[in-house]
């Protein structure tokens, strides 16, 4: 079979030979590449597709190798043309303008004296095209001037050719940057240009609102050519595609931005042409203005392809009227007010007020550090400018201890002194480093000899000998005064942890000290910061940088006391308010639960629509709408059983799941009158299809895995029926989690199990193990996991639990108290058992686990075992899928926040009673 496949597919021979030819002829290379390309697009592709499975792996390997070689060749072609030059000729003065390959075309051309005038005429419509002649590769040594020298340059129609500003692509997108030229009979011809690239943002504005490191990552995800995310302030931003605010309580991180960009809503809108047109119009409304006007962009949002929205004035403005709006009284007063109050809400307020003739004066309160002051451990404060200084009056210089500008307490003071006062002095105290001064009490000077009294050793009067002796272990044993310093050479930007390596840095190996200017060499010396315990080799500037860097780090590392959010305080302001809020949430959930007609109508429509591709399919709703933990705005989760899938026996592999999702999405997309916003997510852990049911006005998530999620919902509903307070209890915790920004890390299902587990350990609910014992009838096994057969009536089950007789405020307080003291590092929340279990019992193959977890032990021996994630700091075990840790994604910061918020909530509720 393998031999037959090789004979029937000659592609292998070509792939194995690759594209390496002995001939250096360009013509032959062209012919060979064209021949291979034609072969692969016809007979070769058919042979590859129809090949046997055994040889397919070999084909894949060869094709990937070929892809790698082609990518490398394209990259080398791009590098070989880096010195290529394009010449543009101005038709006004016939001057040639050279543009190097890969350079900024806009910056180069706008420096020409006639460019601004002609470009202005073009923008105003009085000039249809800007005539410029182009010539390439003239007098360039790196690339020979041949007839094929411009083969990599794109040729446009002579009547209307356009230049787009070159954009550096990612390494994955291998291409050669090109400059558009025109050619008819000759490779070097003249052409009329129409400039389609846009003037850039001011660098200061662009750096603040569109930082390069973030924008590149965003562009790789959403593939939008322009800026789709705008940072408006330290803790705020806006998505220009979705037109939604992105806000956090602290620093706005790159992670928060990328989380939004990877969302389905953003991905969907970023592929819509209309959204891209609106985005382009939005940027065009600001790029043609001066930097102060561009800085006002933080107050605007995209509206339509012709209008933008000012959120400061709550007004829609034509793109062409943006500058006029900035000068309106209402907008001006609000911006100036923000500037005067120095509110750190939005970026660039100091630049924005320049539109109104306000120029920020330089800060005269900053301290300057002088050389003499640094040597003595003092800093000189720069005199403050006042009205008297304008008339020549000067205040006396004021001295103070060197300290971080961000603090004023003693702990933050940086006392910096010279290590050696006077190297040439005969007094030992002058040439011994400051960090060893306390050791001088052990030495006695006798001429050129120093005697160490504790060690009874005589030493030559030499600084290196003395320092070496002090560092000896024998001497350290007699004195506890030796302090461990770190050593930093600011000139070379290197750090050392021991003094031996520090000394070698100056005597051995290369360093940059010899490259310093003579004027600076006389200023650098060794300093010591007694606060940071650091030896610094540098000058005044080095010490100023040290103080600034340390102050920034101290401020960054400064821990803020966690505070309970104001929304939580308002929700928990009194016992009566807690009762009222819980009843309100309960009514909303029950109204959603009672609206079974809409849910049933939606499920019937889905079943009917999907039967065209999945005959005999069944739809099973689950989730918060079914369990009683949702509201009218909650999504409807639906499991679609395409045939014998409920128990997880069919179509469970990733490829089958992706195919099911794509088929379903294709079928639902055709029924646009019934289903809207159909979006497939095949790459999720559980592939789903998202859609909006128009008639029922419900957003739906369709999954195709198995029915275990349906059993999870059934279990939560069962717990609510047994202990009615469970429902308002979980609903209040759900809202509490939302106010604490924990809902993205701890799902509603995980939070519900935390609540159920607390009720289990206090005998207000039964463990899953106990429920199974009371219902001994054989239950369904779904995907290898045992479920519950609910045979015993609910009223009989209630006899086995204690009815909760207290208020919901007390239940919440006890819940917060329990989880504020929970041992997250060692214990696992286990609703199956109804009590915690130690993490170390999950180690190995589960030999030490309780017998009730036999299904977990069995799956560990399967072909694709899944270990319970005990390495996560927060562990909540699913009561059915025992290998699933519901909170495995919670990092240390989230766990600490959850624990702190529980503690703060407990204290707050304790103060009410």
Image (spheres, rainbow, N blue to C red):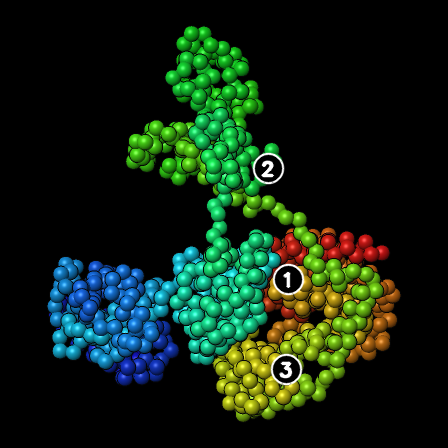
Nearer the observer, 398 or 748: 398
SS state under label 1: loop
Q: Secondary structure at mark 2?
A: loop
Q: Residue furthest front?
A: 391
* Residue at (33, 73) in percent of width and height: 123
Q: For the residue carrying disc 3, how many other residues have a C-alpha within 10 Å: few (<14), some (14-19), or many (20+)?
A: some
| 410, above or below 757, in the image | above
Please name the residue shown 28% across and 76% down the image. 127
Residue 539, position in %: x, y?
A: 40, 32
* Residue 172 at least partly seen: no
> Would you name the residue on which mark 1 appears?
741
- Most foreground residue, 751 or 185: 185
Picture coordinates of residue 532, whole percent (x, y): 52, 34
In three-dimensional space, the C-alpha distance between marks 1 and 2, rounded to whole angstroms, equals: 34 Å
Picture coordinates of residue 606 (x, y %)? Answer: 60, 87
Measure the alpha-carbon separation of dots 2 and 3: 57 Å
Q: Which residue is mark 3?
A: 698
Q: Is 873 rendered above or below residue 388?
A: below
Q: To which residue does mark 2 refer?
A: 408
Residue 883 screen position, x and y as percent? 61, 65
């Amino acid at each position: 079979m393998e031999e037959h496949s090789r004979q029937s597919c000659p592609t292998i021979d070509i792939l194995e030979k690759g594209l390496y030819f002995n001939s250096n002829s360009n013509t032959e290379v062209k012919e060979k590449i064209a021949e291979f390309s034609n072969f692969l697009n016809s007979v070769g592709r058919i042979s590859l597709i129809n090949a046997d499975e055994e040889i397919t792996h070999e084909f894949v390997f060869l094709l990937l190798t070929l892809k790698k070689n082609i990518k490398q060749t394209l990259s080398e072609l791009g590098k070989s043309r880096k010195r290529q030059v394009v010449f543009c000729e101005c038709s006004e003065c016939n001057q040639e303008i050279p543009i190097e390959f890969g350079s900024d075309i806009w910056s180069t051309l706008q420096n020409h004296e006639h460019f601004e005038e002609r470009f202005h005429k073009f923008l105003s419509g009085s000039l249809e095209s800007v005539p410029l002649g182009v010539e390439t590769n003239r007098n360039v040594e790196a690339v020979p001037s041949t007839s094929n020298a411009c083969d990599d340059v794109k040729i446009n129609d002579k009547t209307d050719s356009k230049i787009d500003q070159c954009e550096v692509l990612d390494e994955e997108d291998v291409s050669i940057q090109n400059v558009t030229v025109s050619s008819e009979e000759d490779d070097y011809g003249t052409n009329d240009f129409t400039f389609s690239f846009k003037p850039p943002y001011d660098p200061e504005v662009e750096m603040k609102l569109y930082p390069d490191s973030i924008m590149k990552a965003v562009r790789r995800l959403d593939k939008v050519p322009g800026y789709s995310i705008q940072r408006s302030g330290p803790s705020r931003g806006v998505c220009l595609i979705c037109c939604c605010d992105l806000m956090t309580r602290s620093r706005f991180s790159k992670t928060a931005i990328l989380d939004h960009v990877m969302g389905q809503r953003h991905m969907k809108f970023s592929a819509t042409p209309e959204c891209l047109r609106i985005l382009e119009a939005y940027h065009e409304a600001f790029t043609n203005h001066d930097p102060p006007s561009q800085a006002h962009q933080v107050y605007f949002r995209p509206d339509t392809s012709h209008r933008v929205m000012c959120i400061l004035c709550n007004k829609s403005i034509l793109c062409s009227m943006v500058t006029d709006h900035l000068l309106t009284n209402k907008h001006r007063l609000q911006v100036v007010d923000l500037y005067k109050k120095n509110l750190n809400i939005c970026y660039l307020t100091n630049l924005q007020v320049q539109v109104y003739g306000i120029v920020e004066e330089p800060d005269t309160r900053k301290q300057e550090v002088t050389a003499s002051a640094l040597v003595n451990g003092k800093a000189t404060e720069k005199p403050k400018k006042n009205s008297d200084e304008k008339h020549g009056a000067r205040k006396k210089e004021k001295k103070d201890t060197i300290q971080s500008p961000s603090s004023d307490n003693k702990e933050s003071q940086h006392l910096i002194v010279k290590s050696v006062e006077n190297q040439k002095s005969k007094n030992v105290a002058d040439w011994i480093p400051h960090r060893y001064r306390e050791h001088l009490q052990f030495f006695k000077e006798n001429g050129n000899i120093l005697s160490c009294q504790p060690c009874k050793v005589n030493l030559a009067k030499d600084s290196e000998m003395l320092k070496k002796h002090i560092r000896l272990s024998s001497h350290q044993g007699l004195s506890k005064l030796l302090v461990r310093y770190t050593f930093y050479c600011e000139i070379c930007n290197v750090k050392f942890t021991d003094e031996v390596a520090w000394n070698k840095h100056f005597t051995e190996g290369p360093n940059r000290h010899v490259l310093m200017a003579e004027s600076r060499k006389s200023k650098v010396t060794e300093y010591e910061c007694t606060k940071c315990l650091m030896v610094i080799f540098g000058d005044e500037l080095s010490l100023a940088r040290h103080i600034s860097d340390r102050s920034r780090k101290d401020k960054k590392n400064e821990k803020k006391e966690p505070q309970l959010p104001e929304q939580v305080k308002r929700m928990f302001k009194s016992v009566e308010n807690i009762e009222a809020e819980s009843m309100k949430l309960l009514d909303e959930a029950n109204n959603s639960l009672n609206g079974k007609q809409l849910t049933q109508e939606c499920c019937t429509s889905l079943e009917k629509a999907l039967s065209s591709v999945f005959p005999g399919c069944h739809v099973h709703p689950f989730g918060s709408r079914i369990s009683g933990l949702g509201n009218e705005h909650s999504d409807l989760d639906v499991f679609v059983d395409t045939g014998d899938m409920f128990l997880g026996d069919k179509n469970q592999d990733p490829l089958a799941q992706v195919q099911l999702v794509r088929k379903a999405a294709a079928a639902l997309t055709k029924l646009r009158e019934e289903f809207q916003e159909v979006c497939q997510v095949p790459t999720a852990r559980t592939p789903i299809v998202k859609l909006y049911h128009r008639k029922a006005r419900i957003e739906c998530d369709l999954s195709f895995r198995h029915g275990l999620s349906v059993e999870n919902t059934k279990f939560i509903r069962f717990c609510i029926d047994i202990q009615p307070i469970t429902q308002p209890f979980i609903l209040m915790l759900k809202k509490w989690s939302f106010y604490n920004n924990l809902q993205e890390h701890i799902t509603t299902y995980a939070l519900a199990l935390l609540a159920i587990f607390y009720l289990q350990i206090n005998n207000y609910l039964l463990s899953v193990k106990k429920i199974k014992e009371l219902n001994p009838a054989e239950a369904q096994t779904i995907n290898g996991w045992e479920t519950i057969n609910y045979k015993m009536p609910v009223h009989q089950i209630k006899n086995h639990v204690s009815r909760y007789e207290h208020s919901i405020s007390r239940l919440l307080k006890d819940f917060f108290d329990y989880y504020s003291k929970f041992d997250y590092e060692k214990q696992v929340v286990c609703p199956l058992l109804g009590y915690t279990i130690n993490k170390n019992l999950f180690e190995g193959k589960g030999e030490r686990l309780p017998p009730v977890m036999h299904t977990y032990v069995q799956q560990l021996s399967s072909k694709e075992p899944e270990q319970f994630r005990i390495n996560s700091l927060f562990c909540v075990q699913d009561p059915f899928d025992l290998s699933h840790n519901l909170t495995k994604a919670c990092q240390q910061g989230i766990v600490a926040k959850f624990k702190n918020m529980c503690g703060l909530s407990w204290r707050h509720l304790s103060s009410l009673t």
